[in-house]
């Protein structure tokens, strides 16, 4: 299991050895004073709580419409997955795949991986294939562009409001809360603490 022992300062590139830290303490660069790492209190429990919350909101976001359009008596609803379906139907399969991956698949997998790693640790159990899951988390993170998808929905809401009655659906609010919960899970998660806990379980 790979455990990070050194870290380079993002500001001046000076290499530092990572020493044992207590909860709430932070490490600073000896040259420029920039924050190198911070040991957050209850990091894993907090990240798990945010990940579970995000997962609940993700499923809610897929159950209800994002937007509802009404024009000349015709009402049309739009769900989270409808954008990629429309691209596939129009013959833009690659674009539909990218939209599906960035707005649905990647956010869902990230939350599932976070829960499947952190929930066993909560009960002092070793997760299944934690190294592979963490590696996949790192690779999936750039593909999870749900926040950009939210901005696109807001722009569409403003533009379509000029010629149609547009209502915000329950799914949109759930999707926004899912994005916020995912971001907070990432911010809260202390990777050093995670690797330390995994290492302790591996010794048993």
Image (cartoon, grey):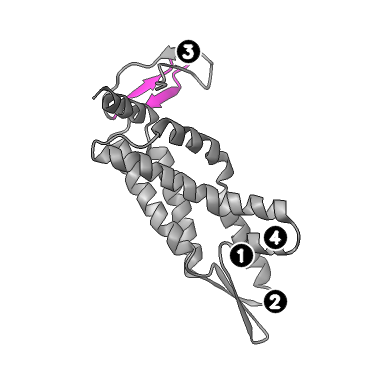
C-alpha gap between disc 3 and disc 1: 48 Å
Which badge, 4 or 3, comes first in the chain's sequence?
3
The crowding category of the residue bearing disc 1, from other C-alpha atoms within 10 Å (few below 14, some 14 to 19, many at least 20), is some
Name the residue carrying label 2.
163
Eye-nearest disc, 3 or 1: 1
Which badge, 3 or 2, comes first in the chain's sequence?
3
Whether 62 is drawn above or below 130: the answer is: below
Tell me residue 115's x, y (percent): 37, 45
Which badge, 3 or 1, comes first in the chain's sequence?
3
C-alpha gap between disc 1 and disc 4: 10 Å
Magenta region: 24-38
Name the residue carrying label 1.
82
**For the residue labelled by badge 4, is the local secondary structure a helix, a strand or a loop?**
helix
Q: Is residue 27 magenta?
A: yes
Name the residue carrying label 3.
15
Whether 178 is drawn above or below 201: the answer is: below
Name the residue carrying label 4.
88
**For the residue labelled by badge 2, is the local secondary structure a helix, a strand or a loop?**
loop
Whether 186 is drawn above or below 30: the answer is: below
Q: Is residue 129 magenta?
A: no
Residue in the foreground of this view, choosing between 165 and 76: 76
Tell me residue 24's x, y (percent): 29, 30
C-alpha gap between disc 4 and disc 2: 27 Å
């Amino acid at each position: 299991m790979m455990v990070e022992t050194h870290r380079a300062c993002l500001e001046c590139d000076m290499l530092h050895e990572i020493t044992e830290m207590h909860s709430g303490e932070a490490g600073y660069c000896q040259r420029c004073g920039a924050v190198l790492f911070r040991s957050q209190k209850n990091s894993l429990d907090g990240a798990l709580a945010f990940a579970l919350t995000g997962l609940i909101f993700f499923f809610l976001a897929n159950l209800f419409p994002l937007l509802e359009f009404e024009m000349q008596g015709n009402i049309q609803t739009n769900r989270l997955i409808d954008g990629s379906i429309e691209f596939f139907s129009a013959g833009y399969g690659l674009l539909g795949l990218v939209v599906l991956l960035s707005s649905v698949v990647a956010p869902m997998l990230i939350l599932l991986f976070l829960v499947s790693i952190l929930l066993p640790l909560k009960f002092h159990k070793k997760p299944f294939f934690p190294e592979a899951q963490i590696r996949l988390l790192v690779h999936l993170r750039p593909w999870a562009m749900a926040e950009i998808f939210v901005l696109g929905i807001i722009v569409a809401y403003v533009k379509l409001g000029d010629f149609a009655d547009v209502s915000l659906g329950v799914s949109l609010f759930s999707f926004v809360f899912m994005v916020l919960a995912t971001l907070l899970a990432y911010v809260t998660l202390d990777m050093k603490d995670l690797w330390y806990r995994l290492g302790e379980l591996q010794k048993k």
